[in-house]
Amino acid sequence: MRPGKNQQVMKPIAIIVCFASIAFILASGCTIPAENPNEVSGAGTVVYIDLEGGFYGIIASDGSEYLPLNLPEEYQENGISVVFEGVIREDMYTIQQWGTPLDITMIQEKS
């Protein structure tokens, strides 16, 4: 029995649909990740906080308070203006109980 014209047309369409479906499934797992919502950047002032033995924090220009976990020693000076970037650490708590814990990824004195 010979296949009819409808079957001859349907076979290539079925193959195309099958390959398109596979391509869609594979492509949906290969997305570019969005920017990390925990990344912050801005300008602010380094401040010395005399609590819990004393520590340095950064008060950003928008009023946000950050507790830098790795503030380089040369920036541990009360009152200096800085520009900084970092990643908020939501997975930890600190004894200072002040500001949002922040891993500094870039910091420089603001000119």
Image: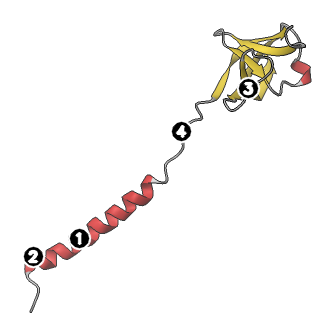
Residue 13 in the figure: left or right of residue 99 = left
Q: Mark 1: which amino acid?
A: Ala
Q: Which mark is residue 6?
A: 2
Residue 65's spot in the image, x, y percent?
70, 13
Q: Residue at x 15, y 74 (%)?
A: 9
**Quick check: marks 1 and 3 in contact, CB under 8 Å?**
no
Q: Which residue is mark 1?
A: 14
In space, the residues marked 4 and 3 are separated at their CA atoms by 26 Å
Residue 53's spot in the image, x, y percent?
90, 13
Specify which label sits upstream in the sequence, 1 or 3. 1
Q: Mark 2: which amino acid?
A: Asn
Where, by quadrant of the figure, is residue 22 drawn? bottom left
In space, the residues marked 1 and 3 are separated at their CA atoms by 57 Å
Q: Mark 3: which amino acid?
A: Tyr
Q: Which mark is residue 93?
A: 3
For numbered disc 4, what is the local secondary structure? Answer: loop
